[in-house]
Amino acid sequence: MKSWNQFGAIETIYEEEREFSSPSLSPSSSSSSPPSLHSIINAWSLDSGCEPDVLIRVQGTSFHLHKDRMISQSSYLKRHLTGVSNVALSPPLNITAETFAAVAEFCYRRRVHLTARNVAAVRVAAEMLGMTLTVGESLRDVAESYLERVVGSDASRVLRSCVPLLPEAETTASLASRCIEALVWEGDDVTFLDVVVEMHPQDFQTVAYSLNRRLPNHDVLYMMVDLYLKENKYGNLTEDQKTEICNSIDCAKLSRGTLVNCVQNPRMPLRFMVRAILVEHLNTRRSVAAAASGAQQAEQRTSLREFLQRDTAHRQAAQIKEAMDSTYSRIQSLERELRGMKKVLLDNSNALNSERSASFHYVPPESSRIQRGGRGSVSSSGFLLRDGTKKNDDEVGSYTLSAGPCHHGNKVPKMTRFFGHRFITGLKNAFRISNSTSN
């Protein structure tokens, strides 16, 4: 969107404020234009060398203007000034002399003085005079841009200025409904409702039908209609008029409290009350159905939650069982490995014991055996007796030793010592022969 400075409106507002505040702008029977516009026309005449060539009458005020400047901006004036030099702007054109002065100023200077009080009138005049050029900035575009700004901050004043311009203000630019919508969006402000009672029934109906399309909630629209039926300045309305106005309200867009109030309101027409009762009954059925559906959904959600919990428990149990089976299988494998290791150790131990037993039970061959009486045998050992003679084993075996008084004191007999010595010597010889044979 282009900035407001590009339209030249802000500069005009401050520069031309004194000019448009002059009381000479009020309608009169004078044939001269307002002084400010008159000076603009004279300056244009001096610059172009052309005198005003058309006369336009608006509510008793005459404007002497240059034809080329007016038809260049207005398609309406272009049609009506073809072949003629004067024209009167009379109803149904709802344009005042003050508004047309602003229009003429824009045609000459491409500037216009706009305020919250006159922007609605200028916007409507621009639409009715066809000042909607597709090339460059038209008066409609300038007024619309300013209107969008001022509606947000001063919608109530703009709304009051729209009432005398109805129905054109609503049919051409939806000005009244836009102002009401802006006031509602500011916080459900209903201080503007006293303005609606000044509207003609047909104008109010037009505004109400526009609001029907604009408002998502019709509580404010219902309050407007109720106030208008109660305090309008045009007296009591017929039942048909009331019905036509109330048809602008969509009962389905009313809150529950407003709908109950509507059913009990004696000012409402009978048809509208019946429709409100039906909507209330339908809403009640929907509420009951919604409550039942909500309970069912809650039960379904509970059942679903329980199902999910059971499913989770089953999955966890399956995972635990799988882990236990895997652990049990591993334990069995380890037990088998342990039994195998024990068997190997036992076999090794038995083999070692067998080798040790074989080393202690060695049997030499027949050729290596010591024969009785041979060398190395015990029987071959002789014993040296006390008299120095040598006796063999047979003789020793038949020799009787006595520990009688023939021995001297506690001394061991000499023969006994020789016997022990020879016995040990014989054993050593036997083992020596056995080792030599095995080697």
Image (cartoon, rainbow, N blue to C red):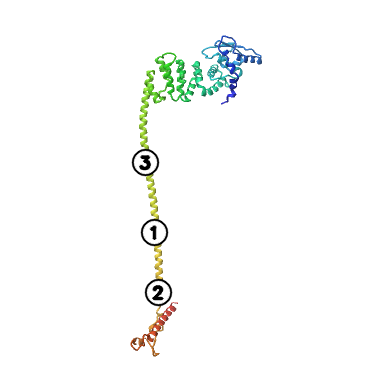
Question: Does the rendering let one see residue 135?
Answer: no
Label at residue 307: 3
Cα separation, mark 2 vs mark 1, equals 37 Å
Q: CA distance from mark 1 to mark 3?
A: 43 Å
Q: Could you tell me which secondary element the residue under label 2 belongs to?
A: helix
Dot 2 amino acid type: Phe
Image quarter in which the N terminus is found:
top right
Give the residue pinned by disc 2: 360
Residue 341 visible here? yes
Q: In this figure, which residue is indicated by the disc labeled 1?
A: 336
Left or right? Give the position of 193 relative to 405: right
Task: Point out residue 295 in the picture as x, y percentages from the top left corner.
Answer: 36, 34
Residue occupying image coordinates x 40% and y 55%: 330
Residue farthest toward the front in the current orientation of the protein:
409
Residue 68: give x, y in percent of width and height: 61, 15
- Image quadrant where residue 76 sits: top right
- Residue drawn at (38%, 44%) of the image: 312
